[in-house]
């Protein structure tokens, strides 16, 4: 905990410090804080409606916290519009996929395309199709005419096209067949190897265990458990996650 | 045979500029969700600017086409200026305020055009080298029309290429679907919006410029084309550019052949086509159903009866109004009478707009409709005033039933566009059918009956009808009818689920609004002694809408405050030459200064005045 400011910058890719977010008058996040190390995979766990998605949206600038601080790569991003946050290297995959249904798969990828980033191998459609072979055979199909699971893959692929350094995934395994979830897990480990950091919100505990280093449990808009995933004991799960 | 071919081709050439305008409108709406009322003004500017440039240059082919090109670009640049300096500041404001800003712009451009180019219609120059005609099986067809025919498909192809084959186009299409996601993917939409506005305005300008040799330039172009463009967009399907192309051709052909068989009927034909299409395909020929639930974000206030203080203030004002003849002169009586009846008209719009959730851009159809009904009854069958005043609401209500039947099938902006289109059709019928309605000369000599000819008596009559009407409307809002209305507005699905026939209920609300607007129109004729088509025109509709917005849509006091301010302003300004310009500027300044709405601004400011320590949910009331 006694790290100097400079060291922190090198060490952490993302720091969220005591943010407070609201929907209208509803106070959703209460001084929520979390830190992520560069190149790590972290997961937000928690029951429904505790504020996981809101946390991710706050980081992305879709919901703007009224108080607190968010530091990405040593730079404050609180209050920046989402397109600038994205340009800094944050990629976001929303909970409800939000595919452009009137655009083909290739066009959806094109929307996400951004210039390559130093130190990372740039994403191209070909590289995407290696990661998600299912998408390859339907390049020109409209986004609205593919299955939910395929949409989920497309949503991730679209974000990858922006060559992000930190990817925020909101419940990526939701609605996917177990085989595909495994595939997704492999893809995430692959990304991690390349040095991409990943922050997930998840309900699927086993999936989270298989890929994550770090876990944050959110309850009532606060982080109430912050530890390495190997320290996530049955008791903790019982206390915060059981319904 | 040749004759029919030429007629057909003429229809196609008419369709061309209509398509250009509608495509631009559709593009702008798709991305920014702005219904650009000033779009027709851009079309008009295209024609005028091209006229001026071409007239200033020697008459050669290069100067003609160069003039058209320059005018087109100039209008595009005007579009950019408007977007950057006006609209960009307002994207966070309620949609209706954006709309009002573009309407204010329409007023400003109209008066500026009158000032800069004069009130006379201008006859367009011929295109050098294309002055002649070609012979098609014995019938002559102007060569220039053939050029026009080609323009539409060329632009359609160009747009298709732009939208499907370029990154810009892909981003534009993505923006029409989900702007928030687009931003999260790193796209800065500021410049996307500006570029779309540029292209849209440019298309309108091009449409105006290329029709110059055929149709010339005049000051009515803006309103006429905007109404036609709305019809095309609704018929073709919102956001569908091929749909707009198809619809433009249908409307163009209809005009071309309609003239042959029923010369005065083109507008009625347009109405019929629109009616048929909307009955068969409510979302237009190539449109997709909208998924949006509800229509506007700004009408969600809970409604409660007025708190005591406000009622007392209302009673106080009413007392002053009743005593007005004691201390006021004739001028005051006329002014306050006008405020009262205009308040009734505004209240009727508020009724369908606030609690009903249906915005009308064409409320003057009912106000003017009632006025014309009264005038015609008196003029042709010598109906006594009291009987005429009884019949006018019925006539206006009938009109509202007819128009409403189509409108309630749609929602939100589509509904509003349709009301505008219908209102413009009503206006055109009155304007063109001079044998019956007196056309531009109006109907004169409609004075009150003998017993009411005294200014004081007439003032009391006006007050009685207006205040009575307002109170009746207010009362309706707190009956089961009113509750059901709000249920329909708040959630169509849920209202449906509990067994309410939403469409029918909205239809009736629409008609009720029409009845009261018509009643206000009825007294209005007798107070003025005459009626002119202006009372049905688009600016009149927007006067009413503007007043309602000015006062604030959250409360019943809003329309009354708004119309008082409006009539007072009109009284002060309307003898100035360019008063709509001034009005437009005032409104633009107001919108820029208070993007959340003037009424909302004062509403939250002063709500503590009227008891109840609430600031979000305005206490609603009116005596
Ligand atoms: N747009 C919104 N407007 C108002 N309240 C919202 C909105 N979105 C979410 N909420 C509320 O905020 C709280 C947190 O929502 P959030 O979506 O962050 O939960 P979550 O942890 O992601 O839940 P889940 O696991 O179900 O996805 C919930 O109580 C929810 O009802
Ligand atoms: Mg969530």
Image: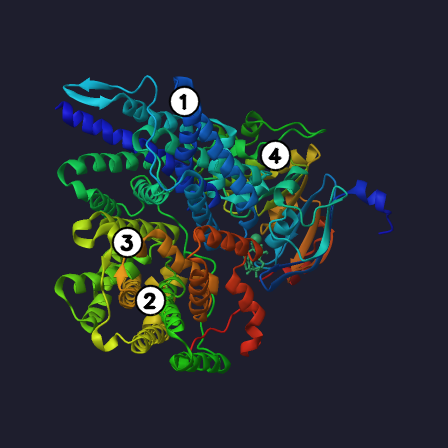
Foreground tag (3 vs 2): 3
Chain for mark 2?
A: B
Residue ID at (56%, 44%): B85
Q: Position of residue B260 (x, y in %)?
A: 15, 35
The Cα–Cα distance between marks 1 and 2, rounded to whole angstroms, is 62 Å
Residue A32 to residue B35: above or below:
below
Between B278 and B455, which is closer to the camera in this rendering? B455
Between B614 and B563, which is closer to the camera in this rendering? B563
B387 displayed left or right of A52: left
- Callout 1 crowding tier (Cα within 10 Å): few <14, some 14–19, many ≥20: some
Residue ID at (20%, 50%): B434
Foreground tag (1 vs 2): 1
Residue B403 to residue B559: above or below:
above
Foreground tag (1 vs 4): 1
Residue ID at (40%, 72%): B332
In which quadrant will I find the C terminus of chain A? bottom right
Q: Secondary structure at mark 3?
A: helix
Between B504 and A196, which is closer to the camera in this rendering? B504
Whichever of labels 1 and 3 marks the residue nearer the N terminus, that label is 1
Labelled pair 3, 4 in contact (Cβ < 8 Å): no
The total number of labels drawn is: 4
Residue at the disc numbered 3 = B533
Q: Secondary structure at mark 4?
A: loop
Residue B516 to residue B89: above or below:
below
Ligand 1 shown in quarter: bottom right
B132 displayed left or right of A174: left
Give the colour scheme shown. rainbow
Chain for mark 3?
A: B
Q: Secondary structure at mark 2?
A: loop
Residue at the disc numbered 4 = A162
Chain for mark 1?
A: B
């Amino acid at each position: 905990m006694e790290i100097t400011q400079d060291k922190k910058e090198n060490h952490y890719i993302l720091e969220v410090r005591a943010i407070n977010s609201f929907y209208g008058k509803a106070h959703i996040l209460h001084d929520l804080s979390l830190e992520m190390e560069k190149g790590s995979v972290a997961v937000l766990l928690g029951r429904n409606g505790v504020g996981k998605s809101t946390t991710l949206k706050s980081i992305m600038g879709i919901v703007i916290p009224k108080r607190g601080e968010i530091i990405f790569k040593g730079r404050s991003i609180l209050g920046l519009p989402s397109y600038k946050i994205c340009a800094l290297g944050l990629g976001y995959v929303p909970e409800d996929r939000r595919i452009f249904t009137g655009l083909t798969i290739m066009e959806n990828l094109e929307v996400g395309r951004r210039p390559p980033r130093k130190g990372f191998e740039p994403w191209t459609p070909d590289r995407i199709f290696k990661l998600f072979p299912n998408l390859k055979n339907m390049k020109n199909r409209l986004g609205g005419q593919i299955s939910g699971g395929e949409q989920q893959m497309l949503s991730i692929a679209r974000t990858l096209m922006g060559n992000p350094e930190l990817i925020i995934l909101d419940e990526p395994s939701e609605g996917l067949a177990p085989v595909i979830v495994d595939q997704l897990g492999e893809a995430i480990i692959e990304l991690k190897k390349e040095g991409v950091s990943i922050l997930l919100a998840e309900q699927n505990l086993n999936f989270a265990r298989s890929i994550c280093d770090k876990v944050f449990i959110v309850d009532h808009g606060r982080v109430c458990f912050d530890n390495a995933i190997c320290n996530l004991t049955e008791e903790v799960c019982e206390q915060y996650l059981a319904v | 045979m040749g004759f029919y071919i030429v007629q057909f081709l003429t229809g196609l050439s008419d369709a061309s500029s209509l398509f250009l305008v509608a495509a631009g409108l559709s593009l702008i709406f798709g991305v920014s969700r702005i219904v650009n009322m000033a779009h027709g003004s851009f079309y008009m500017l295209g024609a005028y600017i091209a006229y001026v440039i071409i007239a200033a240059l020697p008459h050669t082919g290069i100067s003609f086409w160069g003039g058209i090109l320059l005018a087109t670009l100039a209008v595009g640049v005007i579009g950019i200026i408007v977007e950057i300096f006006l609209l960009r500041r307002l994207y966070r404001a309620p949609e209706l305020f954006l709309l009002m800003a573009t309407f204010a712009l329409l007023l400003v451009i109209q008066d500026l055009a009158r000032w800069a180019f004069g009130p006379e219609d201008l006859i367009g120059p011929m295109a050098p080298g294309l002055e002649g005609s070609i012979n098609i099986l014995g019938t002559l067809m102007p060569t220039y029309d053939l050029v026009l025919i080609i323009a539409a498909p060329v632009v359609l192809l160009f747009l298709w290429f732009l939208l499907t084959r370029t990154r810009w186009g892909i981003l534009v299409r993505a923006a029409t679907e989900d702007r928030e996601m687009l931003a999260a993917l790193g796209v800065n939409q500021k410049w996307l919006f500006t570029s779309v506005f540029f292209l849209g305005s440019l298309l309108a300008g091009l449409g105006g410029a290329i029709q110059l040799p055929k149709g010339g330039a005049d000051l009515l172009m803006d309103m006429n084309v905007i109404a036609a463009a709305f019809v095309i967009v609704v018929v073709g399907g919102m956001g569908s550019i091929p749909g707009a192309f198809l619809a433009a051709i249908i409307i163009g052909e209809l005009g071309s052949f309609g003239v042959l068989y029923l010369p005065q009927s083109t507008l009625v034909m347009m109405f019929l086509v629109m009616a048929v299409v909307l009955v068969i395909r409510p979302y237009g020929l190539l449109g997709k159903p909208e998924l949006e639930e509800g229509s506007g974000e700004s009408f969600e206030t809970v409604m409660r009866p007025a708190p005591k203080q406000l009622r007392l203030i209302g009673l106080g004002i009413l007392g002053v109004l009743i005593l007005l003849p004691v201390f006021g002169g004739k001028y005051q009586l006329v002014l306050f009478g006008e405020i009262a009846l205009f308040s009734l008209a505004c209240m009727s719009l508020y009724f369908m707009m606030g609690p009903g959730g249906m915005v009308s851009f064409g409320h003057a159809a009912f106000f003017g409709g009632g006025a014309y009904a009264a005038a015609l009854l008196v003029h042709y069958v010598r109906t006594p005033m009291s009987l005429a005043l009884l019949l006018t609401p019925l006539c206006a209500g009938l009109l509202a039933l007819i128009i409403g039947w189509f409108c309630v099938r749609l929602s939100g902006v589509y509904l509003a566009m349709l009301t505008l289109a219908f209102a413009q059709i009503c206006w055109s019928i009155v304007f063109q059918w001079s044998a019956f309605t007196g056309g531009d000369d109006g109907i004169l000599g409609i004075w009150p009956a003998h017993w009411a000819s005294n200014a004081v008596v007439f003032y009391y009559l006006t007050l009685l009808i207006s205040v009575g009407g307002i109170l009746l409307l207010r009362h309706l809002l707190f009956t089961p009818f009113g509750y059901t209305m709000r249920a329909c507005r708040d959630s169509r699905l849920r209202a449906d689920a509990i067994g309410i026939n939403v469409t029918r209920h909205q239809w009736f609300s629409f008609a009720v609004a029409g009845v009261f607007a018509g009643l206000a129109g009825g007294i209005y004729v007798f107070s003025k002694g005459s009626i002119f088509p202006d009372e049905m025109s688009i600016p009149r509709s927007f006067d009413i809408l503007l007043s309602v917005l000015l006062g604030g849509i959250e409360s019943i006091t809003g329309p009354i405050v708004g119309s008082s301010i409006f009539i007072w302003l009109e009284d002060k300004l309307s003898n100035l030459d360019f008063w709509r310009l001034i009005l437009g500027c005032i409104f633009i300044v107001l919108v820029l200064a208070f993007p959340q709405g003037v009424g909302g601004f004062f509403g939250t400011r002063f709500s503590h005045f009227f008891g109840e320590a609430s600031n979000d949910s305005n206490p609603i009331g009116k005596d």
